[in-house]
Image (spheres, helix red, strand yellow):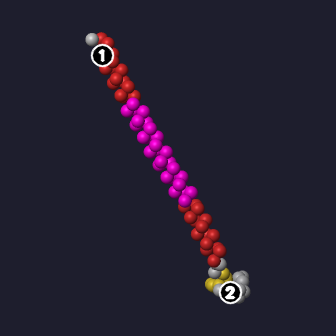
């Protein structure tokens, strides 16, 4: 089993494994980077969305509290 002498290769227990060409290495590293980026970006996008949702919710709650306080003050002034 195994190939003949076409360039550099390693033979171990009768199996010859050819060393990767330059394009194999570059393509593998490129695909690895794409997969890593995709995984990181999806996690990052989740964190950004949660941050923005929390920020928006916090602002809405603060505005609601201010409006409620203003309405209560106005009701107090009308009774006087």
Q: Which of 10 and 57 is in front in this view?
A: 57
Looking at the image, is mark 2 or mark 1 earlier in the sequence? 2
Q: In this rendering, would 43 be left or right of 74?
A: right
Q: Up-down: is 56 above or below 11? A: above
Q: Residue at x 33, y 16 (%)?
A: 75
Density class for disc 2 (Cα within 10 Å; few <14, some 14-19, many ≥20) is: few
Q: In which quarter of the image is the N terminus?
A: bottom right
Q: Which residues are drawn in magenta?
A: 37-63
Q: How many marks?
A: 2
Residue drawn where x is 36% and y is 24% of the image: 68
Q: Name the residue under label 2.
A: 7
Residue at left offset 31%, top offset 20%: 73
Name the mark on residue 46: none
**Residue marked by disc 1:** 76
Q: Residue furthest bottom?
A: 5
Q: Is mark 1 on a helix, strand or loop?
A: helix
Disc 2/disc 1 C-alpha distance (Å): 92 Å
Q: Where is residue 40 in the image (x, y as percent from the top left)?
A: 52, 57
The quadrant holding residue 18 is: bottom right
Q: Does residue 66 show up?
A: yes
Quick check: 15 left or right of 64? right
Residue 15: x %, y % from top left: 67, 82
Q: In this view, does 29 lie above or below 53?
A: below
Callout 2 secondary element: loop
């Amino acid at each position: 089993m195994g190939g003949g002498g076409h360039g550099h290769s390693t033979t171990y227990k009768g199996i010859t494994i050819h060393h990767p060409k330059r394009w194999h290495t570059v393509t593998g590293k490129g695909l690895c980077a794409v997969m890593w980026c995709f995984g990181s970006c999806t996690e990052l996008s989740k964190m950004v969305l949660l941050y923005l949702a929390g920020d928006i919710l916090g602002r809405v709650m603060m505005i609601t509290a201010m409006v409620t306080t203003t309405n209560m003050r106005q009701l107090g002034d009308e009774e006087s």
